[in-house]
Amino acid sequence: MADDDPFPIPDMAEVELVDVLRALGDPARLQIVRKVADGEPWPKTDDTWGLNISKSTLSHHFRTLRESGLTRTIVHGRTHDIQLRRAELDKKFPGLIDAILREG
């Protein structure tokens, strides 16, 4: 993790299942992860999150997901994308993402 990175992520070796599950325990964060489950970058400004929350609350959810090790932030100049660390998570916690994608 670079010291000057404004959006640091934990090394996957340090990511704990309890922290991942705690982050996923919030319905808004779970919905975000389900949206980005394809592992592709999604614009943080995307209007299709389907959440009726303020921009600051959405930013808090993005930060919580990143700090728990679930996502990374990709900076493109003044725009930011969010990306699920899908391959890394699938390797560390096999079946976890598939399990959370199943509804009900």
Image (spheres, rainbow, N blue to C red):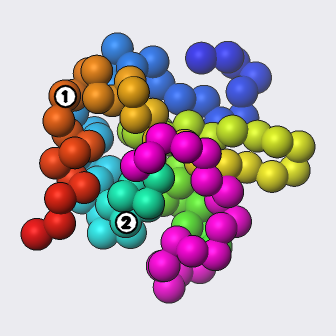
Callout in the foreground (2, 1): 1
Disc 2 + disc 1, Cβ < 8 Å: no
Q: CA distance from mark 2 to mark 1?
A: 20 Å
| Label 1 packing within 10 angstroms: few (<14), some (14-19), many (20+) | few
Label number found at residue 73: none
Q: Residue at x 33, y 29 (%)?
A: 89
Residue that sits furthest to the bottom in the current view: 52
The residue singled out by tag 1 in the image is: 94
Identify which residue is drawn at 40% across, 34% down. Answer: 86
Quadrant where the C terminus is found in the figure: bottom left
Residue in the picture at 53% in, 54% down: 62
Q: Is residue 39 visible?
A: yes
Q: Is residue 51 magenta?
A: yes
In this picture, residue 66 sits left or right of residue 54: left
Residue 14 picture location, percent across and down:
35, 18
Give the magenta-colored segment's residue range.
Answer: 37-54
Which quadrant would the N terminus be assigned to in this image? top right
Does 22 sit left or right of 37 as displayed?
left
Where does label 2 land, which residue? Answer: 31
Residue count near mark 2 (Cα–Cα under 10 Å), binned few <14, some 14–19, many ≥20: some
Q: Position of residue 8 (x, y in %)?
A: 60, 30
Q: Main secondary structure of the magenta part?
A: loop
Give the camera-side residue of 42 and 58.
Answer: 42
Q: Is residue 54 above or below residue 8?
A: below
Asked if 46 appears above or below 82 in the picture, the reply is: below
Amino acid type indicated by mark 1: Pro
Kindly identify the amino acid type of the residue bearing the numbered disc 2: Gln
Q: In the drawing, does residue 68 fall left or right of residue 78?
A: left
Q: Quadrant of residue 44?
A: bottom right
Could you tell me residue 67's position as x and y percent? 47, 38
